[in-house]
Amino acid sequence: MSEADARIDGQVRVSFGPGKMQAFIEVTAPVGEGLACTREQVIKALVAAGVVHNIIDPAVEEALQEKNWNDKILAAKGTAPKQGEDGRLIVKFPLPKERIGPKVDNKGNVNYYDLGLIHNVKAGDLLVERILPTDGIPGMDVAGNEIAAKKGRDYRLPRGKNTVADEQELKLYAACDGHVNIVDGKVVVEPVLTIAQDIDFATGNVDFIGDIVIIGNITAGFKVKAKGDIQVNGFIEGAEVTAGGNIIVKGGITTGIKGFVKAEKDVSARFVENSRVEAGGDLIISEAIMQSYVKAGGSVKVNERRATIVGGVTQASYLVEAKVLGSQLATQTTVEVGINPYYREEYQQLLKRGNEKRKQLDALNHNLQVFQRSGISTENLPDSKRLALIKMLDEFKTIRQELAAMDDRIKFLEEEFERVQAARVRALEIAYPGVRISIGHAIYIVNDPIKYSEFILEEGEVRLTSLR
């Protein structure tokens, strides 16, 4: 029988895409006197194949057109699941990175006095609001099977000290008046002590657990200590001032021989004269450091007005920078960078304490082994001996953890000692004779005035480079 005499009706073929998220139809051409497919045949074929969701009607009509015979046409499309939205934490106070740091005006002038370190809140103030995640919307393949949606990520309230949450854990409030901050990822409120006068005989010495703001001066002979920050709107004169955070002095520092200023973090002031000043972080002075002993775990910068370092000893880990180093009178001025002055002391102390802890651990280990070899069950021990054994085990565990932490710290310090290469000293205008520069263990003595200079370490020696 010839093709002309053949009679084959048009057929419908159904196929699927990955995951049954798509269904395709292919309508074949009739042969000879065969009949073309009808809409009813296409729908019947889709249903027979299990396609029930999101059938595209125009696609069915398109597939039935003669020009599209034997072509694959998308006839149904699954609905993808919609992932739930992540939860959010809305912080209701300015974050430290937004408010802390010297402010720069339109002219480029830097104000080291207004550092924005303190942000006060009152008991009951809303600190953080928690927005819950959504569940998302399930999807469906063309066969009508549900596809589960992924729920959004949830976040817990970052509750720290002196804060309280509501019953639903949706809002975090201040539990007391104080200074709000973020410490190790937690929101905390640190009470602030404000003293609206000088520190003198009317107040006595001050030792406070939080931050201190002193409206006046700290006068000679008195002591001020804070676990947080200390802000002095006046001057520090012959006093002992120590802070676990930053020390900001809007006036100057003149401690003399008996006094000192020491901060775990940064110290900033207008000037330092005849003083001892230590900063675990940076020392930022606007006008001058004169005949003083200062050291910083970070950098020492004097960069406004006269911007002079003259006389005394200036130590820093990374950078010492001023417009003028020394004076025309060849005043002996020592500048040392490259090794954190605190790290050397800490390193020696850690080695000594580590040896002591190891001896304790060895003694405890020996006693525990003696008990283990005895074969006596803890159940048969008298209460007093059982308690002593438990105490011994706790002490063994504690010392072992302390030693591990010490070893990590020693490793960190040893790595820091190798970073001397990046340290440098900058005289933005001039370095005078009498200036002695040490980078690590290398020394450079300035014998002639040197302008616009930077001193760096190369191949174990201090090298001079130009800033222009």
Image: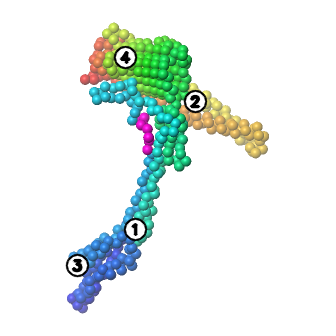
Element type where label 2 sits in the image? helix
Q: Which residue is mark 2?
A: 354
Along the polypeptide, which appears first: circle 4 or circle 1? 1
| Image color mode | rainbow
User: Quadrant location of residue 404?
Assistant: top right
Which residue shows up at 44% across the image and 17% down it? 235
Above or below 374: residue 299: above
Q: Which residue is mark 1?
A: 141
Neighbourhood count class around disc 1 (C-alpha, 10 Å): few under 14, some 14–19, many 20 upward:
many
Which is more toward the observer, 142 or 435? 142
Which is more toward the observer, 72 or 46? 46
Q: CA distance from mark 4 to mark 2?
A: 41 Å
Amino acid at circle 1:
Asp
Span highlighted in magenta in the image: 90-97
**Do the numbered discs 4 and 1 sit on residues whose CB atoms are within 8 Å?**
no
Q: Which residue is mark 3?
A: 66
